[in-house]
Amino acid sequence: MSGANAPGVDVLLRTGPFHSALRASIEHSGLTLEGLRHRLEQRGIRVSMASLSYWQRGRSRPERADSLRAVRAIESIVGLPPHSLAALLGPPRPRGRWTAKSAAMSRRYDGILEPALALAQVVEPVLGPSDHKLRVLFSEDMVTVGLDRAIRSVRTRMVVQAVEDDPDRHLAVYSAEPGSDAREILPLAHENCRLGRISRHSQAAVIAIELLFDRRLRAGETHLFDYEFGIRSPAASFDYRRGFRYPADTYVLGVRFAESALPVRCFELTQFGAQGGPCAPDGELTLTGGRWVHRLDRQVQPGVLGIAWEWD
């Protein structure tokens, strides 16, 4: 029996969303993701396991020409009518240079990372006038993943520069895995700054904290500080993402895994633009002997940068 006739699959092919229809079709075909990836490779189409996983979980969607070619091949492999999955994707999201309107919207937290509404509700009440007066010259995130495969801490070091007079604080935001609790995210440490207001969401695992400088900066002055979040959520992690609402000069992201809980693959995650859009795994990264994987980016534009990983 073809996947199109399976209970639930035919309905999802009519109503969507794409990721649900894809997941149901793959499950009904009896193929594992590894088996599907191998079938695609036999047709000369290379798609990472991470991309397939993200597509069927709704964390990214295929938009590039080679990805759309893979979707058409998947339809054939799992026994679906031609274009049945591709039709659920709709038109591609906007790309290219930013307009003044989209740049203005990038200042908000509800257009870059998920959960969008919860981020907006937590951040906007504590988003002060310093927000647009600081440029990030350097930002470094060091992420620790524990034996339970969950992110346990994120330590951040930043150098910011005042582009106008009077900025005196930075807003740090963290969003944990879905199903977690904001009370499980704790500010552990901070240097060369002090804690101000703390805003937590009542339902989603989102927290925002003010980091206050010891003085107001004059235009052109720089400030170095760092801070750390501890995460107690038991939910397994599959990636870490940093959202940029404004351009930044240099960003370094490192992820260190516990010795007995190493991923099988690691990939870069990159998303350009203010309105979400695709954030697909791309560019496999090497895990070093010290259990570290990292990426370095310069001249960062608004969007999302991160690292994703696959467990066995």
Image: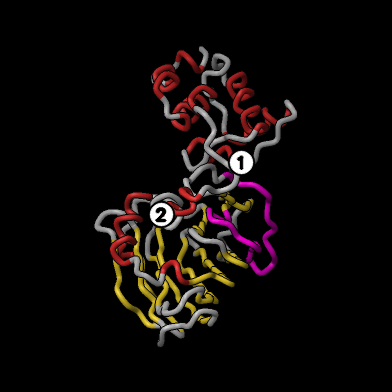
- Tell me the tag on residue 65: none
Question: Which residue: 55% across, 46% down?
Answer: 279
Residue receiving disc 2:
177
Mark 1, secondary structure of its residue: helix
Q: Residue 258 at what x, y percent from top left?
A: 55, 65
- Which of the 4 image quarters holds residue 40? top right
Instruction: Give yes or no for contact between labels 1 and 2 (Cβ–Cβ under 8 Å).
Output: no
Task: Tell whether position 59 is magenta.
Answer: no
- Which of the 4 image quarters holds residue 252? bottom right
Label 2: how many Cα within 10 Å (few below 14, some 14–19, many 20+) = many
Mark 2, secondary structure of its residue: loop
Mark-to-mark CA distance, 1 and 2: 20 Å
| Residue type at numbered disc 2 | Glu
Q: On screen, 156 above or below 233?
A: below
* Nearest the eye: 221 or 139: 221
Residue receiving disc 1:
49
Question: Which residue: 53% across, 66% down?
Answer: 143
Question: Which residue: 54% across, 39% down?
Answer: 94
Q: Which residues are magenta?
A: 280-307
Give the main secondary structure of the magenta stretch.
Answer: strand
Label 1: how many Cα within 10 Å (few below 14, some 14–19, many 20+) = some
Q: Residue 153 at what x, y percent from top left?
A: 46, 69
| Residue type at numbered disc 1 | Met
Q: On screen, 183 above or below 188?
A: above
- Which of the 4 image quarters holds residue 256? bottom right
Task: Tell whether position 291 is magenta.
Answer: yes
Q: Residue 2 at what x, y percent from top left?
A: 52, 14
Does 99 sit left or right of 111 as displayed? right
